[in-house]
Image (cartoon, grey):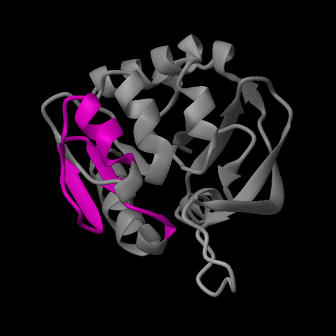
């Protein structure tokens, strides 16, 4: 069974994480959740409330489900994985400083393995220097992160550029997963 790396940390977005986690497992892939340490992590519901009586200008976070990482970033060997799924939420803002995670993501990218990324996950691809010269999408408030990584940002549901497929938010999970699964199947 092919393994897919899913790096995350506290405040990873629940729908960015659980939809692909279960969809990949349903398609016959073993999803290996990795974190700064092998432990339980908190997910969040990460959105601007659509019906707040007092408008929010920024994303509000509410507690979500828990998910267990079974491996620490320092123990990830990129050659053990067929690809990676990088979810969003607030976690990437902090995880992008983890050199072990960046090493693993860079090695997967250098090997041309399929990488899917949604929302704030672009911060990890930028920090790992994987999107230079590519066209990507992400949530609009992370467009600057994409550009700082040397990418051309476009506002589309899903963008495929080589072995990297990106999406804006969890609202784009279905087309993102269709594309990512096609990429993985082509590599089997």
Residue at point 67%, 83% (across, down): 52
Residue at point 35%, 29% (across, down): 126
Task: Verify whether residue 161 appears in magenta.
Answer: yes
- Whether residue 99 is visible here, answered yes or no, is yes
Q: Position of residue 158 (x, y in %)?
A: 28, 63
Q: Which residues are magenta?
A: 142-170
Q: How many marks?
A: 0
Q: Nearer the viewer, residue 54 or 91?
A: 54
Q: Nearer the viewer, residue 42 or 22?
A: 42
Tell me: 111 left or right of 23: left
Q: Position of residue 159 (x, y in %)?
A: 23, 57
Tell me: 129 left or right of 134: right
Q: Quadrant of residue 107?
A: top left
Task: Verify whether residue 34 appears in magenta.
Answer: no
Q: Quadrant of residue 92?
A: top right
Q: Quadrant of the N terminus?
A: top right
Tell me: 38 left or right of 155: right
Tell me: 175 left or right of 79: left
Q: Nearer the viewer, residue 89 or 66?
A: 89
Q: Quadrant of residue 123?
A: top left
Q: Is residue 138 above or below residue 102?
A: below
Q: Is residue 93 above or below residue 104?
A: below
Q: Which residue is situated farthest in the front direction here?
A: 54
């Amino acid at each position: 069974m092919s393994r897919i790396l899913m790096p995350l940390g506290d405040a990873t977005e629940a729908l960015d994480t659980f939809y692909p986690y279960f969809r990949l497992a349903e398609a016959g892939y073993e999803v290996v959740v990795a974190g700064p340490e092998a432990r339980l992590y908190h997910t969040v519901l990460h959105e601007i409330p659509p019906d707040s009586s007092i408008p929010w200008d920024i994303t509000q976070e509410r507690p979500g489900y828990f998910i267990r990482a079974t491996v620490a970033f320092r123990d990830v060997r990129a050659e053990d994985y067929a690809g990676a799924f990088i979810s969003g939420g607030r976690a990437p803002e902090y995880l992008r400083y983890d050199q072990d995670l960046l090493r693993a993501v860079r090695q997967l990218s250098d090997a041309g393995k399929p990488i899917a990324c949604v929302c704030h996950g672009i911060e990890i691809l930028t920090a790992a220097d994987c999107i230079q010269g590519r066209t990507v999408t992400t949530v609009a408030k992370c467009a600057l992160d994409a550009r700082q990584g040397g990418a051309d940002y476009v506002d589309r549901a899903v963008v495929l550029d080589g072995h990297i497929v990106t999406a804006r938010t969890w609202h784009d999970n279905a087309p993102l997963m269709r594309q990512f699964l096609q990429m993985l199947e082509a590599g089997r």
